[in-house]
Image: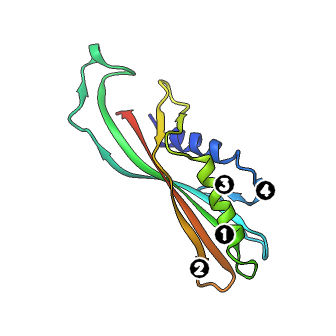
Amino acid sequence: MSLSAIQAAMDARFATINFDAARVVFSNMTFQPTAGRGYMIAEAYVTSVSGEGSTLGASKSVGGAGTLVRWDGTYHVDCVWPQDAGVDGANQLVDMVLALFPRGLTLASGDSPSIRIVFNAPKPTPAAADGSGVWVRGSVACPWFAFVFT
């Protein structure tokens, strides 16, 4: 069980987006925006953990003895576009993310046993000026859950 494997599965899905890969930024990456060129930033969060009472004995366990817990999280994508180009470009990026992470999407982590990551309906935020005078930002929060053995 690992958050790294869960995030890797989500990042691998996001990497398939039809956008310049050099302008797709993942967690813990150094990136310097280029004036006049939009970009996207993706980050994964665990927002809650529940189920501490679901202990499985060694004889009844799947993937080893331990506790089955539910992790809830969000895969958050910021869609950034040059402000002088208007909001349409950022909103088009938001639409691309919405199509990539639909409700019901299930991904598998690289863990053994594999963890199924299930997505609920994504929540877009329309693009608006971010106050910098340079960029507009739209975003998509892609809520997910997974059952993990600890």
Give yes or no for contact between labels 2 and 1 (Cβ–Cβ under 8 Å).
yes
Q: Where is 129 relative to 13, above or below?
A: below
Furthest residue to the top?
Answer: 59
Q: Nearer the viewer, mark 3 or mark 4?
A: 3
Q: Earlier in the sequence, mark 1 or mark 3?
A: 1
**Are the residues tagged 3 and 2 within 8 Å (C-beta)?**
no
- The residue that label 1 is drawn on is 80
| Residue that label 3 marks | 96
Separation of residues labelled 1 and 4 (CA atoms): 13 Å
Residue 108 at x, y percent in the picture: 54, 32
Q: Amino acid at mark 1?
A: Val
Q: How many neighbours does mark 4 have within 10 angstroms: few (below 14), some (14-19), or many (20 or more)?
A: few
For the residues labelled 2 and 4, the Cα–Cα distance comes to 22 Å
Q: Which one is closest to the eye, mark 3 or mark 2? A: 3
Type of residue at label 3?
Answer: Met
User: Dot 4 corresponds to which residue?
Assistant: 20
Q: Estimate the x, y position of residue 4 in percent, counting from the top left.
A: 52, 42
Q: Earlier in the sequence, mark 1 or mark 4?
A: 4
- Residue under the point 66% across and 69% down: 80
Q: CA distance from mark 3 to mark 2?
A: 20 Å
Q: State the image coordinates of residue 85 (x, y, percent, origin top left).
A: 76, 78
**SS for tag 4?**
loop
Q: Which of pointers 2 and 4 lies earlier in the amino acid sequence?
A: 4
